[in-house]
Image (cartoon, grey):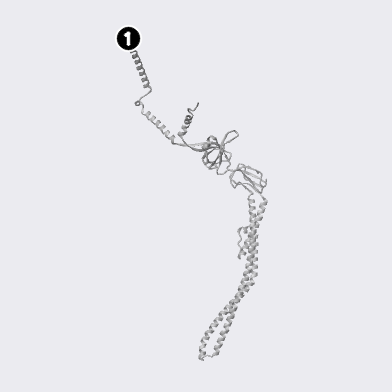
Amino acid sequence: MSGNLNINKAEDWQKIRGAWVDNQLEKLQAHAERFFVTDDEIPLSRHILLSMITLFFVIFIVWASFAKIDETTHGEGKVIPSSEIQIIQNLEGGIVNKLLVREGDAVKAGQVIVQLRDVGAASDFGANSAKYLGLLATITRLQAEAEGKSTIEFPEEVVTGVPQSVTEELNAFKANQDKIYSQTNVLRQQRDQRAQEVRELETRARDLRGVIALSVQEKSMIEPLVARGSAPKLELLQLERGIKERQTELNGVLQGLPRAQSAVSEVDARIGEIESTAKAQAQTELSAKLVEMNTIKQTLGALQDRKDRTDVKSPVNGTVKDLKVNTVGGVVRPGDPIAEIVPMDDQLLVEAKIRPADIAFIHPDQNAMVKLTAYDFSIYGGLKGHVIDISADTITNEKGESFYRVKVRTEKSILERKGEVLPIIPGMVATVDILTGKKTIMQYLMKPFIKTLGRAMSER
């Protein structure tokens, strides 16, 4: 009996347990039906939305894995002069005549900043210029005489600069021409006489040859008549005597002709000698005057340089930093500084401070962007440039901060916007972005996780 009772109790317990489990399963299923739905029950719009979200994340991951952006190193810096400050001086000094600039003014290379007055230089230059033009007039006259010209053409600068010298040289030229003419005039008359004698002798010789030819012809006609007895022999003898006399006279004329011609040549030689002597004398004087002119040219060159230096000019494009003279009429002593010019070339030099942690990836010729704090980058933009120098070691400032000095040279020295030119001067503060490479967007996003993983499981 007791054994059957125990068995029934066990079966009842199993039934109760099974009923409880079934009850719990029903409750769990009811809860599941409240929070979950089957695929058949999900609306089509939710399917599309889930698909689009999934596609967006896939596209974003692919794009972020390939799209690259610039990796830059940032540093603070300032604009510095591209070359040493230029100190303007004057060798001779002088009196201040005009002040054409003020401190802070931008100047161009070759622009006059101060005009000095050097009375001595101006006076000496004027005197030597007049002397030079007068000497040039003399040289022009001597060249004409040395070349045997009958007229002179003076340079325009001589005609307008020293008309009195032109008149004097024309008179001298005429006097020398008259002197030569007077010396050669008698000789020319003698030459004309000798030439006339030559012409007369040549005419006489020609006539005698004609007479002799006729007489010889006449003789040839009479000889047969004399041989036959038709003409007297005396007539033949007279004809022969006449031929001989004419031949003798012709020989005398022919002998005298070379002497007459020689006399003409002798007179010509004497005339040529006088003219050559005059030309040689003019050439000698010309050589001496040319030497003198070269000396005056050198003096004028030095005086011109001295005169030009009274216009004190800026040697470079830049800004007037310190104007030492401020009073018109003031005296500038020789060699005294007149002004200081801070150079400002077509390219700027920017000195940036880079942290030691960022220096490893910076090297010369890397591209950089200079953003001046004085001008809003979003409005005016920046200046493109490139790295030209990196300091060999760190530099520590008065605050104890260490940094590397990196110099960047820009492509331009001004900013422009809608025709407005914004000048940039040394001392302006700037932010320098140096392009050190490129990274994908995914690399940037994963960088914090990679750093965390690098430190994970390494702590004590």
Q: Residue at x 63, y 72 (%)?
A: 187
From the viewer's perspective, is residue 150 above or below residue 85? below
Q: Which residue is mark 1?
A: 3
- Left or right of 116, for residue 244: left
In the picture, residue 256 is in which quadrant?
A: bottom right
In the picture, residue 19 is in which quadrant?
A: top left
- Secondary structure of the residue carrying numbered label 1: helix
From the viewer's perspective, is residue 293 above or below residue 274? above
In-front residue for pair 393/20: 393
In-front residue for pair 154/24: 24
- Left or right of 453, for residue 149: right
In-front residue for pair 188/66: 66
Tag 1: residue type?
Gly
From the viewer's perspective, is residue 335 above or below residue 185? above
Q: Position of residue 285 (x, y in %)?
A: 65, 62
Residues packed near mark 1 inside 10 Å, few (<14), some (14 to 19) or many (20 plus):
few
Q: Position of residue 135 (x, y in %)?
A: 64, 59
The quarter in which the N terminus is drawn is top left
Q: Position of residue 250 (x, y in %)?
A: 57, 81
